[in-house]
Image (cartoon, rainbow, N blue to C red):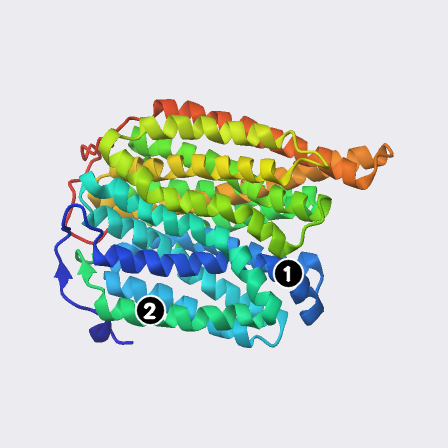
Amino acid sequence: MSSLQLDSPATPATAVPGRTPAVIRLLVLATFVVILNETIMLIAIPELMSALQITEATAQWLSTAFMLTMAAVIPITGWFLQRVTTRQAYATAMGLFLLGTALGGLAPTFEVLLGARIIQASGTAVMMPLLMTTLMRVVPESDRGRVMGNVTLAISVAPAMGPTVSGAILQVGTWRMLFAVVLPIAALITWGGLKQLKNIGEPKVSTIDWLSVVTAAAGFGGLVYGLSRFEGGETGTAFAIVGGGLVAITVFVVRQLRLQKRGTPLMDLRTLRNRTYLIALIMMSMAFMAMLGSMILLPLYLQNIRGLTPLETGLLVMPGGLAMGLLGPTVGRLFDKFGGRVLVIPGAIGITLALAGFTQVTMTMPFWQLLGLHALLMVSLAATFTPVFTLGLGAVPPHLYSHGSSILSTLQQVAAAIGTALVITVMSARAEVLKSEGVETAVATLDGMRLAFIIGAALSVVVIITAVLLPARANNTGELDEPAKGHFG
């Protein structure tokens, strides 16, 4: 598509109070589809192993590569979103996603399928910061909680629905159907979005520093990849890759601090000077680690210990995911009315209580108790994420919104990788010790899961501490060095 087709005159960043702007509704719908696709492959792994003649470790790369690509690409989006128009960013994100989806459905080999997932992830990596940045620019502060609640609905319901939708499709078709079903829906949303979407703000022409691009991709991508190697028990290799990733991130940070003096950083770290934003980042990271740990452990417990099918597992965890999403708008309205503290502090306590409850899982714990604990965790996360996102980004000056959302999205991926690696490593190590002492495999694995849940509960205590430190409202005083400018970002 030419820039002439993609561009339209920029519209003022204003909205009617009490109504969700059309641009946000479009972006939320598109985000729902791309995030749904992130988890839709999980249940298809056994079939993929059989159809493509690959091992489970190889099949897991379809998820690892997706997360790896997100971690590598998202740091670049802060610069990218400032440089292009809203429509160009949307067209890029959905174009990559459509290309990856079409390629995935036709993939003759695993290698092509893996490439398709990487292309899909590149589109998803642009869509998330685009949604957050646009929201902060077009929604009045008095309405941000309610609108962010609708965003939370899309972001939380989609991953919860992924395994369930996947299980239902796989009952009647092959794994290729997962791509075939998503493709026309995504194409329709892309067409509708380009037809209705208007540009918000003006792009800012700037050069890109390729050393920053390389060190960001190597650093954040290497960190996520290294953490994923812990799951396979390759401790020495994993530590080496994580160490290399941390070195690259250090180089990246030093480079950004130098570029900030010229006003051309790839990722503007001045957002971290804002206390509210920094606390929100820490809280979000810890909550994501705890959440991802439970999202990995609970299906393993239900399938490997309790013998449920993937579809039954998806149905059991679906109510919690739906509750989290459906409560999003209500949480948003409460935030607009009362501020963040009345939601975040009880939410943080609820997260800890739910994870503490999971430390008591047994071979025969009633399914209604498991469902209740999972629902409590999801509802508590709903009460936490909407205020934290809104407070954190709301505290950043407008000209740094794209960088703030980019950092937030990058740390989500890193926190997810850390949480996953941590629980799998702890569970596996504990189980191996017990099995070497003659304990039955199922009992040893269950004890490992309980210890991993204890780690998750301990991490969640940090969420409570940071919740107490957060203010009730964002204090966007534009306290950072530069005045806000009228460009997109």
* Residue 164 location, quadrant: bottom right
- In the picture shown, does residue 39 fall above or below 420? below
The residue at the point 59 percent across, 45 percent down is 296
- Which residue in the protein does label 2 denote? 190
Seen from the viewer's position, the closer of residues 177 and 226 is 177
Label 2, residues with CA under 10 Å away: few <14, some 14-19, many ≥20: many
Residue 94, percent across and down?
37, 66
Seen from the viewer's position, the closer of residues 110 and 178 is 178
Asked whether, in this view, residue 128 is left or right of residue 299, the answer is: left
Residue 469, percent across and down?
35, 23
The residue at the point 53 percent across, 31 percent down is 354
Q: Secondary structure at mark 1?
A: helix
Residue 175, percent across and down?
59, 69
Q: Are marks 1 and 2 in contact (CB under 8 Å)?
A: no
- In the picture shown, does residue 252 fall above or below 201? above
The residue at the point 49 percent across, 54 percent down is 161
The residue at the point 32 percent across, 48 percent down is 150
Q: Quadrant of the N terminus?
A: bottom left
- Which residue in the protein does label 1 denote? 45
* Residue 203 location, quadrant: bottom left
